Image (spheres, grey):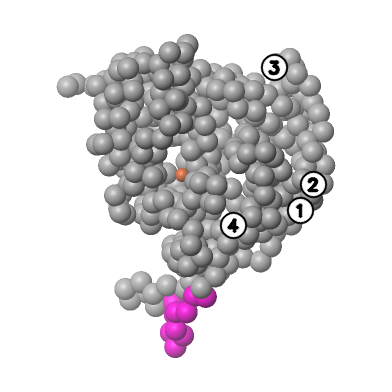
Amino acid sequence: MSETRVNAVGTSDLRTAHQDLHSEQGALRGEHPGRSRSPVIKVADLAWLEFQKPDLDRAEVFARDFGFGIAARTAGELWLRGTFAGSPCIVIRKGRTSSFIGPAFRAAERPDLDRLARATGTDVRDADVPGGGRAVNLLDPSGFPVRVVHCREELPALPEQQPLPLNFGTDHRRRNTAQRPPREPSRIQRLGHVVLETRVFGRALDWYLDTLGMIVSDFLFLDGQRDRGPTMAFLRCDRGGLAVDHHTLAMHLGPGNGYVHSAYQVTDLDSIAAGGEYLNERGYKRSWGIGRHILGSQLFDYWRDPDRLLLEHFADGDLFSRDLEPGWASMSTSGLAQWGPPATRDFLGASPSPARVRDVIQALRGDNEMDPARLLGLLKAANS
Ligand SMILES: [Fe+2]
């Protein structure tokens, strides 16, 4: 098949470097450009994720074992942090059930909040964060509460877990010293990304591009259904020439609206592996890992918390400036990793549960972007 490669946004300064850098193909003529011409604002990063859980003591035990520090703890809130200076990674509020509430994004500057509030017909409020700050509270098209925040204070940096000095071939950085990494929890540095499933992928995608100014690093489409548009996108923040994480938000079409996983950076592969052994010894369940992803290239290891929420340790991810245009590839399980064990059914969410069956029935009956052809396409992707 002959395919015409076009520059996705019609400008000449974007690089068409997918072959070497991330995925195999660029856009075809007329496909989604992957960025908005004039977004309301451009968020600078994910700030933190909000969860609720009934038992904050239990949540704190897992958080420490996974490698978080505690930024603040009250009767009703647990704020978790990494070692890097900046905002906390997670707030867990005491609630009836264990669930994801929504993401908070960091505004690049305080006036962005006013611009965003005006454009969305809402107002700027107190952010309810330790140290104080301001926030605009929105709902995305999937129904997730999304906050855009500007914090008054940054958390100071904490001591780092040092990367191990490695010997490579004849490049010897370690002599007369043994390699003895301590068996201890990984030390989380920062929040990296969150992945969400949505029944209204196309609407949600455009909302994040138009409202928050995010840009697409990679699109995935269902095999044989490329003409119906993408069904997954990896979104990064647009910081101009500054290279940032390949994705801070990833979204895919599915029968449910929900949290898939969130990812936290640690220093290196040894931190992932030794931290994983520590979690294993304490009886936590590894979902999938250790391996190296294709899109984003991260070294990864996925774990279930005691409430079965999925969290990822990662290291060595790709950093892209705004100069790269989106890659396009077909969605498949084999496309998830360059190396590592096969993706597990647990990670893929492929084991049927009553809740999942209910999701499928509701999605096929409702007014959304799921239909039988797409459902079959998703099932095929999960087995390919
Ligand atoms: Fe991830």
Q: Position of residue 358 (x, y in %)?
A: 44, 25
| Residue density around tag 2, few if under 14, some if 14–19, many if 20 or more, within 10 Å | some
Residue under pointer 3 = 120
Say whether residue 38 is visible: yes
Residue under pointer 4 = 62
Q: Earlier in the sequence, mark 3 or mark 4?
A: 4
Q: Is residue 139 magenta?
A: no
Residue type of the residue flagged with mark 3: Thr
Which of the two marks, 1 or 3, is nearer to us in this view?
Answer: 1
Q: Secondary structure at mark 3?
A: helix
Q: Earlier in the sequence, mark 4 or mark 2?
A: 4
Give how far apart the Cα atoms at labels 1 and 2 are: 7 Å
Say whether residue 21 is visible: no
Mark 1 and mark 2 in contact? Answer it, CB < 8 Å.
yes
Q: Quick one: which residue is furthest to the bottom in this view?
A: 176
Q: Quick one: which residue is furthest to the left in this view?
A: 1
Predominant SS of the magenta segment: loop
Above-or-below relation of 118 to 291: above
Q: Secondary structure at mark 4?
A: helix
The magenta span reads: 173-182
Q: Is residue 176 magenta?
A: yes
Residue 375, by quadrant, is top left
Q: Quick one: which residue is furthest to the front in this view?
A: 354
Quadrant showing the N terminus:
top left
Residue under pointer 2 = 130
In the image, the residue with mark 1 has its CB under 8 Å from the nearest atom of ligand 1: no
Residue type of the residue flagged with mark 2: Pro
Residue 120, by quadrant, is top right
Which residue lies at the image location 72% right of the left edge and 35% below the top edge? Answer: 149
Q: Earlier in the sequence, mark 4 or mark 1?
A: 4
Residue under pointer 1 = 72
Does residue 81 appear left or right of residue 281 in this picture?
A: right
